[in-house]
Image: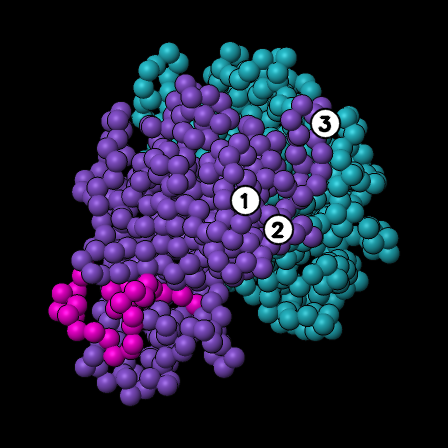
Chain colours: A cyan, B purple
Amino acid sequence: MIEPQLTNRPSWVNVSKNSDFTLYNLPYGIFKTAKRSPRVGVAIGEEILDLTAVAALGYMDDLGMDVTVFDRPKLNDFIALGKPIWTKVRARIKELLTEGSDLYKHADKVLVAQVTADMLLPVEVKNYTDFYSSQEHATNVGIMFRSKENALMPNWKHLPVGYHGRASSIVVSGTNIHRPKGQMMPPNAETPVFGPSQRMDFELEMAFITGRATDLGDSVTTADAEEHIFGMVVFNDWSARDIQKWEYVPLGPFLGKNFGSSVSPWIVTMDALEPFRVAGPSQDPKVLPYLQYEGDKAFNINLEVALLPEKCQKETIISRSNFKYLYWNMAQQLAHHTINGCNIEVGDMYASGTISGKSEDSYGSMLELSWAGQKTILLEEGGERKFLEDGDTVIMRGYCIKDGIRVGFGEVRSKLLPAK
Amino acid sequence: MIEPQLTNRPSWVNVSKNSDFTLYNLPYGIFKTAKRSPRVGVAIGEEILDLTAVAALGYMDDLGMDVTVFDRPKLNDFIALGKPIWTKVRARIKELLTEGSDLYKHADKVLVAQVTADMLLPVEVKNYTDFYSSQEHATNVGIMFRSKENALMPNWKHLPVGYHGRASSIVVSGTNIHRPKGQMMPPNAETPVFGPSQRMDFELEMAFITGRATDLGDSVTTADAEEHIFGMVVFNDWSARDIQKWEYVPLGPFLGKNFGSSVSPWIVTMDALEPFRVAGPSQDPKVLPYLQYEGDKAFNINLEVALLPEKCQKETIISRSNFKYLYWNMAQQLAHHTINGCNIEVGDMYASGTISGKSEDSYGSMLELSWAGQKTILLEEGGERKFLEDGDTVIMRGYCIKDGIRVGFGEVRSKLLPAK
């Protein structure tokens, strides 16, 4: 819900109208500075609100919670306190940052300029699952790898296809990634070769983070699923297409993916995303009862991918997509994931799969944008790409706008380094 | 290495010659009793040596380590101290348990009867990978699902195929597992159905646990790989074949596996397994340089699977296999897993994949033993099976024997409960 009593007054912190981090957003992250150990912060405009400092001033004393959870290097302990506490803390932070609060007197203690802080991975990722929930992406890949007639696998419209990914190699925005080496089978070759991947790609995704655990054997319904979700990040699922192609039959992607996945540092909460709820695509054929749901479960989140080659000043926006295009929603993903009794933990990350739209400029990977290397992507400062080159920085952004309200994710930005 | 100076004297603890837990073994686990909180123990005969109690008596004071790591509910902190400490602690425990040590005076403080203790999951599993390293198993499954001519995929002999599994649902021996529900596509049906799996299976596997981390971007060579391995457990990778068959294309197994995997409670260290090192199968075609290795990298570990139906007294041994049958060894698995820079963590678990031998009575799953339901498996007290029935207890055991020395894993035992 939007808290109506507070929406009309601005913050005492200077927040530009185009900022991703308005008073409506209040995303959580982990930051550190030369003087502050890693701890929980909330983004507001170009500042970070240091919750440990806020709590030390006594502003959180009456919330009935252990405020030491803010003085930790991961968000898991805070998230584990549960939704009633998330709601209370959000309301308190909004109140404290709104004009009329006396917190402004302590601005020097509680605010840290974002430019002076390092952002860290916001959660300890307990388990990581990657779905494959964009019909357009699955269809594009299916056409390229098989044929137009057999593009979507028979199971695709009956269940949200997904697979387990590697939690250890999920890193925060700003962490550069080395081009992976591995086995590939060149076209028409008889034996595989070894070397750096020649088909480096990104995948434009979003991921949700669970904040409420279940026991092994229990299932979550689509109606209850959102109660388990704390918030979301933008997610770059780096992919080495040639390594992936050779290895993935029959057990799925492995080394073509697990060398790194990058996330935006601020977790935007489901409370902040509530105003941007919309209907998702209609599903035909009708899904089995455990996957049926009521109400709007998609979210209107604009997404874009920019490419910035080394030594260039000007980035090129190479894709504009939207989270609402996904065929399967998060409630269905979580209901499916747990229908067999698989237990979820606080801090799990569940990525959407590449988010492609219908138009060619909305595709969420180089594989699709260059149609497996058959087309070229032109860059603003000259040059072109089919896949990524060493030194390329990939930037993904996400933001919602409605009725003059902006809630954004900031960005996930990482540079591709040469193979080690 | 066998520590030669100590092998000739027995323990002051009563250890039967047929015990898995001889003085040569000394596996680590986490136990608790009514009076002792979860902590690190070492199995010896039918007893557990309580390392927290041993340390409290001062017997570990000169090892140059933080002995509080023994008073923790997981082994990760101890394991993270590194191989020089593993070696020192192992030598000290062997010395303390050998006749001549005065520890026997404190037997009432430091020994706990295994029958009075509950064994817990020994490590916090950070990441879980499942390989597919038995040629016989991969061939059997390939013949059943495709054809004899196309049984092994083209990549299989070039790389150790593997995929990421679910860490959260790995449980310790004694934890019962509910039959999972899910989507299946019956033969000749047009739309999937929902219900409890009708093809419940186990997979006989072993898993190794890493004890030394790497940074993202770094690789581990086959020569160094064993330095990263702390020890091994027996691993039951429960599988719902009908759910798996419908979901696994193109991204691999997911809900057909992630409802539960069961491990034996005692981690047998690589030091204890050293005497049982043997040559593995020869590999043809020759593998790429990063997968080549020197020396014997297989281990002669006898494995068996027993089935005990509900209300029966007598178990039926339905499979006898051996870890040494695996085509790909652990050093190759770890070298492959990290060749792209994927980072490993302390407490990761890497399972072998189903371990089948050449003979029909050495197959490591019901799928193979019943040849996809075409054959029946006869039980000792009457009755038969093609797949598992509710109430069936599956017991897997592993042990090494050489020159009168026995080192065993104990067992992983779990009952299949009806769907919730």
Q: Is residue B65 magenta?
A: no
Closest to the camera, between mark 2 and mark 1, is: 1
Gap in angstroms between the C-alphas marked 2 and 1: 13 Å
Residue named by callout 2:
B390
- Do circles 2 and 1 both sit on a common chain? yes
Considering only vertical position in the picture, is B50 above or below A28? below
Question: Main structural element of the magenta stretch: helix, strand or loop?
Answer: loop
To which chain does the residue with label 2 belong?
B
Q: B189 or A8: nearer the eye?
A: B189
Residue named by callout 1:
B384
Q: Position of residue A206 (x, y in %)?
A: 62, 38
Work out whether mark 3 precedes mark 2 in sequence or the reverse, and give the earlier one: 3
Q: Position of residue B283 (x, y in %)?
A: 26, 31
Gap in angstroms between the C-alphas marked 1 and 3: 31 Å
Asked if residue A104 lies left or right of residue B234, the reply is right
Residue named by callout 3:
B191
- Do circles 3 and 2 both sit on a common chain? yes
Question: Which residue range is magenta in the image?
Answer: B1-30
Please tell me which residue is depicted at 59% across the width and 62% down the height of the picture. A77
